[in-house]
Amino acid sequence: MNLPTINDILILLPEAYLTIAACLLLLIDAFLKPSQRGAMHWLSIAVLLVGIYLVIANQPAVNVTAFSGMFVLDRVSEILKVFALIATVLVFIYGRPYMVDRKLFVGEFYTLMIFAVIGIMLLVSAGSLVTVYLGLELLTLSSYALVALNRDSRLSSEAAIKYFVLGALASGMLLYGMSMVYGAAHTLDLAQLHRAAAHTDMHNLMLFGMMFMIVGIGFKLGAAPFHMWIPDVYEGSPTAVTIFIGSAPKLAAFGMAYRLLDSGLGELSHYWQPLLAVLAVLSLAIGNLVAIVQTNLKRVLAYSTISHMGYLLLGLVNAGPEGYASAMFYAISYTLMGTAAFGMILVLARAGFECENIDDLKGLNRRSPWLAFLMMLVMFSLAGVPPLFGFFAKLLVLQSAIHAGMLWLAIVGAVFAIIGLYYYLRVVKVMYFDQPVEGTEIKPQPDMPMRLVLSINALALLALGFSSGPLLAWCRSAFGV
Amino acid sequence: MSNYLLSLLIWLPILGAIPVLAAGSGRPNAARWVALLVAIATFAASLLLLTHVDAGTAAKQLIEDHAWISAINVHYALGVDGISVALILLTTFVGILVIIGAWEVIQDRPHQYMAAMLVLEGLMIGVFCATDALLFYVFFEAMLIPMFILIGMWGGPRRVYATLKFFIYTFFGSIFMLVGLIYLYNKAGGSFDLATWATLPLSMKEQSWLFFAFLIAFAVKVPMVPVHTWLPDAHVEAPTGGSVVLAAVMLKIGGYGFLRFSLPIVPDASEHYAWLVIALSLVAVVYIGYIALVQEDMKKLVAYSSVAHMGFVTLGIFVAFLLVRGSNNADAGNLAMQGAMVQMISHGFVSGAMFSCIGVLYDRLHTRQIKDYGGVINVMPWFGFFYVLFAMANCGLPGTSGFVGEFFVIMASFSANPWIALFAAFTLIIGAAYTLWMVKRVLWGEITNPHVAEMKDINGRETFVLLAFAAAVVIMGVWPQPVIHLMDASVTHLVQQLGNHKV
């Protein structure tokens, strides 16, 4: 064990900067009058934008580690961090009018989210089981508090408690699994674990620990059968928090799965591949089937998330660099689609009206054709209809599954894509084919930055469909493909 | 410019939709005129194909090839041969007529209607141009979105049911093809190039799976029995323009898919299962013909008749296998394939015309039930003239385009197996029965419905649309040579490809 040097700190520069900035924001917020809170908003966005710049500028040409291998800086972590930060900026922009309308516009909204993002950044750069756990806890503890932000709401408190209890359970499982793996491999370092995993004397203990760790990963991804918390938390949280939980942490979950399963247990891939395949099939089935009967848009999107995690798992199942690249590509595409979808709910919600039910969108095309068009893009992208971004993401994970020799799994994925199509089409149907209901005048938020960014976000789904090449090449290069 | 002619054809209507939308609901007339101009410009550009494409060779021409998603070797690769050119011309021709046909009929948000039509047109042209399988798939699927909107927004009372059924059915068909495409991509070492796939060795087992993946995608699109049930619903509920495009062009994409995918890529499986497709085609011709006979709704009747007529297309394509591989009769194989192609083009004109006629009636009486009409000829003589002409073409009367393709296919099938020809020839009787019986009940007889007596004959706009269709039907009927010549080299090449054994 070497003592940390200044170099170690420099490698951690973006994270260190964000931690200091978040603390300062917390301090500044204490001295702001409620009427000045707008400053907090723009300041937080500026902090994150600088963070994006630092992540890119601080990226070395070759992979480096810090703190004796506890922290890894590679291209994978760079991409995940950049998109997690972008997603959080989007969340801030989309969330503001909603929080203002509901008198929830408090400084904690910003600082907690920045802390959560720092957790994500640690998690995706983890080089050791300890760092994984550290990042994960920072992310989830901040999330619990965010879900409970609307503390007078029964639904919100219920969601927070559920999230907390199940989340703590999952963390416990993960930790338990880690302890077993440590017992078998005598190391916490992922790189050493990678070498030790296949040659340990205590093979069964290792596999047992691996299974517990997969439970933890499944919970973070929200893959069935560890998905129970997703619908309630999505529905109960203030939508401005739901949009966060549904976006950046998915990148973190992918990063965590990659670090643990490939960096750590890559040699055991033929043991965990079938387990992930089972999780994938269950997620696809439960997510898509249950979403059909939902009437609440947030719940629909919650079940849709579950199914999307199933597709992401199709990429992971491949257990090769191409598969990881497609899974990461999928996670990024889902993050952009998720922020846009929840952003649409946020732009249509106003004081006293949540715009949570699918029926609330009735006749949107007659009231606001532009927003209806954007929402249509988002829905078709989620459904995976070309030429939108979501299609190419699906294409790649299906390709990875077939490449790994799991043709049957790809066919399952294809079948559930058809079933999933139905509920996305239903949203388009309601917007375009139904008459608006009298008395529920939809008035989109007039907030210009929000509408502008939301438009760019949704149009990006079309643009990235037309030219997904560079992003895909970037993802693949991170895994050396 | 000829280097980018195909891209121009695809993107002109798609991008042209933007100014149409921008013209906005406030100025519906501006939107209509812009849309018409775009459609005419696209048609004019497509006429250039005739001079820029050499029909004497089967090679792909006007090739454009740019790396699109280079990480997975997907290309924006376009190229056309005679078959594609014929279908593109059909698309652009129909594209103008549906814009004119919808002129004052669509009053609700006409700018969105016109924009959706133009986007649809561009995507369909893209399908006929793509030589990269993934690009083909992207166009093939993206096409569903504007059609979904067209049926759902401007359709009849059960439009939501119909359009959801349409979308999910076709998506269901094509997603398995996608899995097949990815399989081929991996097999070919990471290439979506159709020409590469045509020479890719595949075992019989692989070919069989792929054959069924393609069959399900294209059979839904054509549509073949028993996956045709979305079509009557979609047709009945779709607005007139939607029906016209659906029948005239979209169904052809199914037949086109067989030519570009099933035949060259999985020839042995196609031969092995040709009996299945032929049997299903004959069922479509005979059984669906009988179903058409009992329809009360004119659109449904024509929809079923479309299924029956498209049966000739699939019959012609797969009979060619029996001829080339079974009896080594390449000439008859050529004839069958040629017939299938002519039938595709002809059916495009005839069905488009029939649906336009029904649209004319529907705009006046707002019903499509045959029993609500009767004696229309007394008040609408000009309309009656066109209606009878198209009805005759629909029965395959010599001198109209409907005759040429069916005659070729029946003649060729006779060399393969007289029984096939016998069943196929049933269409001459059944087709005449359902079409003429409809004409009798709608046009002739006494006027029983007082509303019919108040109907006005077709106006200038409607006359123009019907006249254009009529010209196409008659010219192709008496002088099919140019169309046949256009496709001849490509068809001959396709038939040669049938003979290539991969196993």
Image: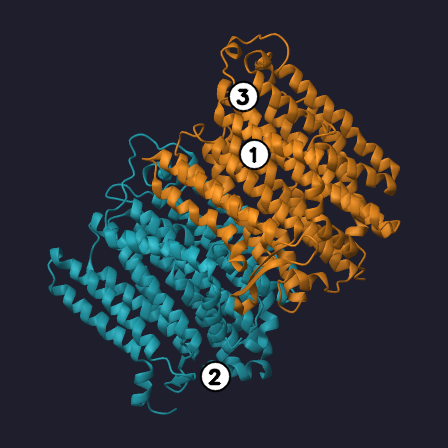
Mark 3 in CB contact with mark 1 (< 8 angstroms):
no
Q: What residue is shown with label 3?
A: B361
Question: Mark 2 falls within which chain?
Answer: A
Determine the image quadrant of residue B30. Answer: top left
**Mark 3 packing: few (<14 Cα in 10 Å), some, or many (20+)?**
many
Of labels 3 and 1, earlier in sequence is: 1
Determine the image quadrant of residue A85. Answer: bottom left
Q: What residue is shown with label 1?
A: B244
Which chain is depicted cyan? A
For the residues labelled 3 and 2, the Cα–Cα distance comes to 81 Å
Query: Looking at the image, is B178 positioned above or below residue B149?
Result: below
| Image point (54%, 84%), residue name | A195
Instruction: Give the amino acid type for the residue marked by disc 3 in the picture.
Output: Leu
- Quadrant where the N terminus of chain A lies? bottom left
Q: Nearer the viewer, mark 3 or mark 2?
A: 3
Q: Is the residue at mark 2 from the same chain as the one at mark 1?
A: no
Q: What residue is shown with label 2?
A: A187
